């Protein structure tokens, strides 16, 4: 028999607890990307904390810890666009602090920054899908208690302007002709991309609610521009000269 306060508990989960998990996931992943790198103790603490909150969110979406994401949504299917790779889940579970003879010892076996970037991307995309399917009553209370996620909303605004402003700039005049004639350069989320491109892609995902199609298209246009000798910084200067604000092109 459900508890009398079950409705209040579910509202509180959406108002505070699930946003808290997302906040911790993103904050620890971001902490690993600071320059200079944090001291070893802090670096390791970020990795372990990320693993804890990543596993918590994956279990929530899959309904493994007694709280099911489907209970807050309409027509939501967990990870309908692809499950988290088993090797990544295995690394997450091994990274959670515990003493055992089965802990991984090599760099390849341990959760690393490339794994974390991949997991962050996949979980952010799933968060976006979850929010798209969320029932209206929970959308009304989402992240209202402590506003854990407001900093990423603020960061998303200039980034979304970048996608709207930079891509049309690439499509202007000769750039459009050159890009079409160059053929399609397919961007894929992969571990061999450069750190700078990975950062651009991650910021694009945050700024566009985890929309991988939009960010893949953005990266393809960026690749085409580079293939045709267009300097992104010069393009930014051109946009400023055309009347775009500095905030829009940064």
Image (tube, rainbow, N blue to C red):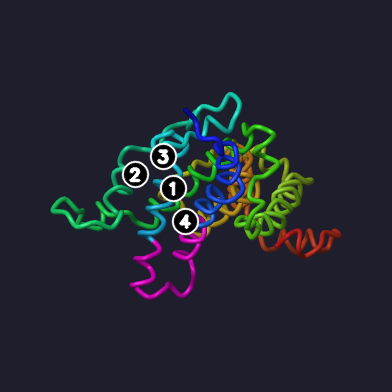
Badge 4: residue crowd in 10 Å (few <14, some 14–19, many ≥20): few
> Are the two marked residues, 2 and 3, in contact with CB atoms closer than 8 angstroms?
no
Q: CA distance from mark 4 to mark 3?
A: 31 Å
Q: CA distance from mark 2 to mark 4?
A: 21 Å
Q: CA distance from mark 2 to mark 3?
A: 14 Å
First-in-chain label (2 vs 3):
3
> Are the two marked residues, 2 and 1, in contact with CB atoms closer than 8 angstroms?
yes
Foreground: disc 2 or disc 4: 2
Foreground: disc 4 or disc 1: 1
Foreground: disc 4 or disc 3: 3
First-in-chain label (4 vs 1):
1
**In the image, residue 220 lies in the stretch drawn in magenta:** no
Magenta stretch? 26-46
User: Magenta: predominant secondary structure element?
Assistant: helix
Q: CA distance from mark 3 to mark 1?
A: 17 Å
**In the image, residue 35 lies in the stretch drawn in magenta:** yes
| Residue displayed at 19% across by 57% down | 99
Residue positioned most to the left: 101
| Residue displayed at 45% across by 39% down | 60
Residue holding disc 2: 88
Q: Nearer the viewer, residue 128 or 148?
A: 148
Residue holding disc 4: 194
The kind of secondary structure element at disc 1 is helix
Q: Position of residue 206 (x, y in %)?
A: 60, 50
């Amino acid at each position: 028999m459900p508890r009398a306060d079950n409705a209040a508990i579910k509202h509180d989960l959406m108002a505070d607890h699930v946003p808290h998990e997302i906040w911790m996931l993103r904050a620890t992943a971001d902490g690993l990307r600071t320059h200079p790198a944090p001291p070893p103790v802090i670096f390791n603490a970020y990795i372990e904390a990320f693993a804890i909150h990543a596993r918590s969110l994956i279990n929530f979406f899959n309904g493994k810890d007694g709280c099911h994401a489907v209970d807050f949504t309409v027509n939501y299917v967990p990870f309908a666009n692809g499950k988290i790779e088993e090797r990544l889940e295995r690394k997450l579970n091994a990274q959670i602090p515990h003493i055992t003879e089965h802990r991984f010892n090599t760099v390849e076996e341990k959760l690393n920054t490339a794994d974390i970037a991949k997991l962050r991307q996949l979980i952010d995309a799933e968060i976006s899908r979850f929010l798209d399917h969320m029932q209206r009553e929970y959308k009304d209370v989402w992240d209202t208690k402590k506003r854990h996620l407001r900093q990423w909303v603020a960061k998303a605004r200039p980034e979304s302007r970048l996608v709207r402003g930079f891509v049309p700039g690439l499509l202007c005049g000769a750039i459009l002709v050159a890009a079409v004639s160059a053929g399609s350069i397919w961007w894929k989320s992969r571990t061999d991309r450069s750190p700078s491109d990975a950062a651009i892609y991650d910021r694009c995902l945050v700024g566009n609610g985890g929309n991988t199609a939009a960010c893949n298209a953005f990266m393809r246009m960026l690749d085409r521009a580079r293939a045709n000798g267009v300097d992104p910084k010069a393009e930014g200067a051109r946009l400023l000269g055309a009347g775009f604000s500095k905030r829009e092109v940064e």
